[in-house]
Image (tube, rainbow, N blue to C red):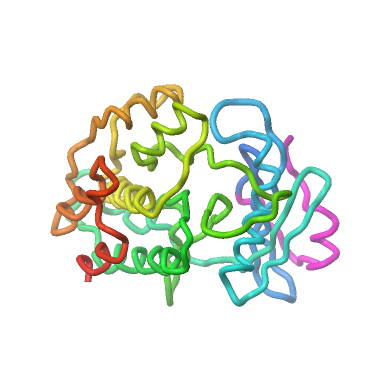
Amino acid sequence: MPVTELPIVIVDAYMPTSKRLVLNRRGSSVWEIESERGRHAVKLGYSNESGEGPAQPWTALAPGREGYILNRLNEEATPYGEWEEGTWNVQPWREGPSLWQLWEGCRVPGSTMEPLQRDALACAEVLAELHGKGWVHADVQPAHFVVGSERVHLIDLALARGGHVPAGLDFPFRGCLVHYEAPEISRSVLETGWAEPTQAADVYAFGASLLISATGGRAVEYPDDAPRPVQREAIVDGRHRDVTIPGPMRSLVREMLRYDPKDRPTIYEVGETLS
């Protein structure tokens, strides 16, 4: 169901003076709005049972689930609720490039630009902050690190695990964007249809995020148009692409992408190495 307008409950509460549809696919719609209350991101979830991959009925619950989690993690309140197609939340707009955008120059053929360790460290620190609170992000990817002028923001916590979530908003974890799935996550999804996210899997996903942002290459090679089960089978088989990040981050990312989760560094050890 394409989402072309904001729900009336959001319009009445925020009276936006401008709005921009940022994303509208796979059961999720994201808007940027401006009002007297500032700039905000509005996330709408709706059921989308067609197609392959993460577009499933649970997408209708995701914004409400994220809103509940953000309220547990942050001092700043995140409004959330229901609309006729699913759930919604409203959170501050995070300004800045994603890690993928920030390192775009590294991926230009012939470029001598190297990814900066300070950027990777800032991303590691915000993920370590989440892990320190006992939570797992479960959907770490370059687009979810927004590098602001003062700090990095780790966004999109709808799949996060680590504490109680009301049954009416909760759903099983059935994997994330496959490019960043750890082998144990892909194996579990293939065998059972769901998985248990861990901090070690977050570290793997962060390593894969650093690799693809710096080089443009996924951690595991498979055809772009391969079905998701085939992609996951390639990850389980461990057919890793060589880590070609220039500079001292190369050896660290190799450790983060270790096949066995027990062999990977913790996010705190990642931060220590980067600093």
Q: Is residue 227 magenta?
A: no
- In the image, 105 versus 205, the foreground residue is 205
Q: Which residues are magenta?
A: 1-22
Q: From the top left corner, tell me how far across and down residue 162 is, in percent.
A: 52, 58
Residue at the spot 22% in from the left edge and 43% down from the top edge: 109
Q: Quadrant of residue 267?
A: bottom left
From the image, which quarter does the N terminus lie in?
top right
Residue at the spot 54% in from the left edge and 66% down from the top edge: 94
From the image, which quarter does the C terminus lie in?
bottom left
Q: From the top left corner, tell me how far across and down residue 215 is, in percent.
A: 25, 45
Q: Is residue 21 magenta?
A: yes
Q: From the top left corner, tell me how far across and down residue 236 is, in percent.
A: 32, 30
- In the image, 56 versus 218, the foreground residue is 56
Taking the image as shown, residue 24 lies to the left or right of residue 266, namely right
- In the image, 106 versus 14, the foreground residue is 14
Q: From the top left corner, tell me how far across and down residue 225 is, in percent.
A: 42, 23
